[in-house]
Structure formats: structure tokens, C-alpha cells
Image: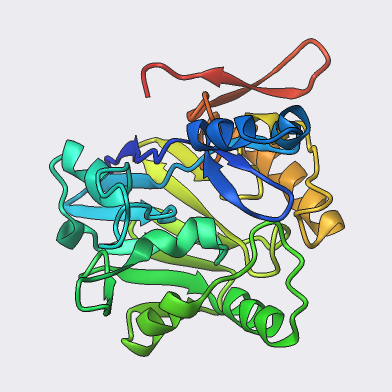
Amino acid sequence: MNKRHFSFEHLSEGQFDLYPDGSLLKSEQASVLGNSRLDNELYLSLSTSVGIDPILVSGNGTHVLLDAGLGLGLDHKSANPNISNIRTNMEIFDVSPSDIDHVVLSHLHHDHIAGLTYTDNQSRIQATLPNATIWVQRKEWNHALEAIDTGNDTSDMPYQLDDFYRLVADGRVQFLDEGTTEIIPGIEAIRTGGHTPGHQIVRIRNNDQLAYYFGDLVPNEHYLGFKMMKDIDLEITESRQIKVLLLKQAYHDNADILFYHSVHLKHGKLTKDTNRHFVLKSNRNA
């Protein structure tokens, strides 16, 4: 079997406060806004702190991005064009937008896809990653279209596909119909459902080690104990079942776990506490 060596880098866009209506504010911005309100304490208590962390997988002459972030600062109209986003973060690792060959989207919520496009100074929608093929489940695309058409989008982060339509029309998006698809040798997309009907995860074989990217099925270390997001996960029973199976498999594989929405622990390996519950052991050498 050929050895495959991949490196992983979190392209962190920072820490955000997520509110029940799906709005996201940078944490420092939310604090300033909250301080201007009489109900500041209540206002701030409604939020949940999350990270936004697209993951750059590099190796074997290719670069693959796992989800694409919010893309703040990419638009020429932005008040702060220097804010952290996938483009500015890739520069740190000497990777340019044109170097990205593939993007695997766990699902189509706005906080996972907005970084794929920007509006140039001619008010035209442009692809942030001009050479990348974008992979998403067809079931996810169909669900997103139905949610928008019927107005029944009740998720934590409503679908906003205006710019994504442009990428589809330009032939940049490949829709997946199989349960498991090999994107490149060593990197597989696996449809799980749960968080959304067409949600998918990514399994990476790195030499003799495995790594799993669970997307929003397990967004951070706080959801390792089969804790459910009852107001967020659309398919609660299915989501719980697949989480149990995947976490058990990842533990058995001694695999690295990569998180998208963690504030502090971005990755690590699973272990069990004294109550036999899964917890994360930070892997400083990964």
C-alpha cells in the first residue's frame, strides 16, 4: 500500500458568538454591542461561543479544504479587509487560493460556505478558490433548495445560497450520490445525515493513522458525549445513532479528531474518563 502523508492546518477565522436567530458576531464586536444595551447581561447570555475553523489538508502534491468559513473581509465593501479569512490564513502557510484543488463541504449552512465567494470591485461574484472542485452531497443541495422554496428553514444557520448558485452555474460544484466517495487517494467523503439530511464527514488515511473531520455532527469537544443540539440537528434520532457509531469507530482506530467549531481544542485523540465517557486528549504532536 502506498504511503500517504498529509498535514493539517486550522485556518481559524476567530471566536464568534452564535445567537438563537442564527446571527454570528465576532466576540469582541458582540461585547461592544452588548455594552450599549440596558439588557447587556441577558443579551450576552443568549450566545454560544464557537470557533470558525476551515481545515487545510496538504500532501501528495495537492491541497484540500474542509469547509470554507464565513469569508469575512473578502468583499471589497468590507470595513475591515484585513480580518482573518481563508485567503489571509493560507498566506501564512505559503498557499495561494489557486493552489486549492478540492473543497469538501460538510453541508451548506452559511458559516461553512460563505468563504467560497466574494464580490469584486465591479460588483461581480467571484470564486475565492478559482481552481477548486467543490464536493457536496446532492441530498444536501436538494434539501437546501426545498427549505428555501418552502420557507421551512428552521436550522440554527439558515441557508443563504445566492452566491453558491453562481458556483453551481459555473460548473464548479460536483454533487455526490454515493454514501462514500474517494475525493483523492486517502481522503473520503462519507454521507451521514443527522445535522442536516445531506451532511457528510471526511475520513483521512494519513500513513498508518486515520483522522476524522465530523463537520457539525460533532462540532467541538463539548459534543463528544452524544450530547445533541435539539434545536439545531434536524434528524435527532439519526444524528445520535451515527454519532455513537462514529465516535466508537474513531476511538477504536485511535484516530485524530478535527473540529470546525471549537474555541480552544482544535484537534486531538479520543480517550475515556472514569465514567467511560469520551473526552478529548489534546495531541500536541499532531
Horizontal side of 211 relative to 119 (left or right) equals right
Q: How is the image coloured?
A: rainbow
Q: Quadrant of residue 84?
A: top left
Count of number-bearing discs: 0
Instruction: Determine the image quadrant of residue 234.
Output: bottom right
Relative horizontal placement of residue 128, taking residue 144 as reference (left or right): left
In the picture as drawn, the residue positioned furthest to the top comes out as 274
Depth order, front residue of 25/241: 25
Q: Position of residue 100 (x, y in %)?
A: 23, 59
Q: Nearer the viewer, residue 119 or 257?
A: 119
Task: Kindly identify the residue that appears in the image at 66 percent across and 60 percent down.
Answer: 192
Task: Looking at the picture, tell me which residue is in the foreground, 259 or 185.
Answer: 259
Would residue 202 be visible to someone looking at this image? yes
Instruction: Please give the name of the residue rendered at 26% of the width and 74% of the height, measured from the top-left corner.
Output: 126
Q: Can you tell which quarter of the image residue 134 is in?
A: bottom left
Residue 42 locus on image (x, y percent): 78, 32
Q: Position of residue 40 (x, y in %)?
A: 71, 31
Left or right: where 220 falls relative to 41 = left
On screen, residue 222 versus residue 220, left or right, reads: right
Say if 12 sits above or below 160 in the image: above
Q: Is residue 1 visible?
A: no
Which quarter shows the C terminus? top left
At 69% from the left and 64% from the top, the residue drawn is 196
Residue 108: horizontal and vertical position, in percent? Answer: 55, 67
> Foreground residue, 100 or 190?
100
Q: Residue 163, relative to residue 59: is it above or below?
A: below
